[in-house]
Image: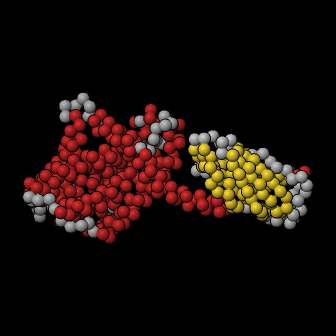
Amino acid sequence: MSAAYIDPRVTLDSSARIAHAEFTIRNRSSETWRAAEGFGIGYHLFDADTGTLIVDGARLRPERDVPPGETMRAAVDFELPPEKGRYQVLVSPMREDVCWYYDRGWPFLLVEFSTEGEIARLERVRVATRETLRRQRELRAIGRAFTYPVLSLWRNRGLIRVMVRRDVLGRYRGSFAGAFWTIINPLLLMLTYFFVFGVVIRDPRMSRSEFALYFLAGMLPWLPFSEAAGRSPGVILEHRNFVKKLVFAVETLPVNLVVSGLVTELFAIAIFCGFLLGIRHHVPLAVAWLPVLLIPQVLFTLGVSWFLAALGAFVRDLGQMIGFLLTIWFFMTPICYPEQQLRSTAPVLMNNPMYVLVRGYRAIFLENRAPEFGPLWKFWLLAVVVFVLGHAWFYKLRKSFADMI
């Protein structure tokens, strides 16, 4: 059962936002189309980006019965919404209180428009089916999954910059050291771990200075990741006033945490380079490979932070749970002890993304060589996947944030 559209023509009155479609439709089904049985030609107007039905249009009834193989001439007018956007009009046979035949796989006339300001444009006219439209939407959805997070970050870069500055300066406002606590806190944490594992429980095969460099190089990627991941579960609740504002870009809240951690890491890298100059009297040229590690590190951290931030709005205990999980993750990563002690669990370590980063940082800072390509390209792939899926998860749940908080 089907229908065929012959010589479809669509004209648009841009100023009035009214379109007129004319075509001949042939009955290729085995049934006669009768107006008395509720048959007609109608249209549905959808938002192209969301797939939301906006208008269930008027019906055109045939003046006479249309037997199989016969044709009828159809003319349909439809008005476009005044809001800016992309719209799709599906013109299709239907039967009142029975069905729309395009839902049953019949071809339909698809008319695509775009509007901006007072200007409406006719983009495309074609015959399509529900299946072909579904495949095209899936392909566009895949493309948007990769491009929308990047575009969102770019469009809100000014807001992110202001929020990061506010976070860094406001977190320690009123304290004696002020924003310097951004550097002092991670430094004190690293010194504490160094005292425990480098002085109290020291590997006799390494001098204290060499162990300090080995340990601090491993802490460089861990600190910004753990800071962002640890704070993400509570970021939606912490900024509940912003979440309830419809015009606020909620997806930037976890981004602020990641960028704040990155700022802290950059200061830590500068201090670490000072240690290298003091102990080894030079900074290795392999440091030029640092962006190859930083980019996937930021992507991976962003994806994890988006996921935890969205989940944290629904699971209030996640903040306490993630602290425990991060502690386990820290000790599963050879940061404060030699890698050789975990040789028996090497396959597990190789699947630990933070281990890839830790080894990469030690390679460029301590061994003056590029990171190993094999684990690195896998980490790049993982980082992109986590980045895309994390944003998709956050985007899917964001509509429910206001209700949950």
* Residue in the image at 19% along x and 46% along y: 187
Q: Where's residue 214, x and y in %?
A: 17, 59
- Residue at the spot x=30%, y=46% of the render? 261
In this rendering, the count of numbered labels is: 0
Residue 91: image quadrant is: bottom right
The front one of 396 and 203 is 396
Q: Nearer the viewer, residue 61 or 139?
A: 61
Residue 338 visible in this rendered orientation of the protein = no
Q: Residue at x 80, y 60 (%)?
A: 25
Where residue 318 sits: x, y (%)?
41, 44
Colour option used? secondary structure
The x, y position of residue 79, in whole percent, is 70, 44
* Front position in the image: 114 or 354: 114
Q: Residue furthest top?
A: 174
Q: Is residue 380 above or below residue 225?
A: below
Extreme residue in the bottom direction:
374
Give the answer, above or below, for where 160 lies relative to 6.
above
Say which residue appears at 60% left-offset and 61% top-offset: 136
Q: Position of residue 34 (x, y in %)?
A: 89, 55
Tell me which corner region of the image, top left, top right, bottom left or bottom right, holds residue 24: bottom right
Examine the image and state in which quarter residue 238 appears. top left
Q: Taking the image as drawn, is residue 122 in sight?
A: yes
User: Which corner quadrant holds the N terminus?
Assistant: bottom right
Depth check, front residue: 318 or 370: 370
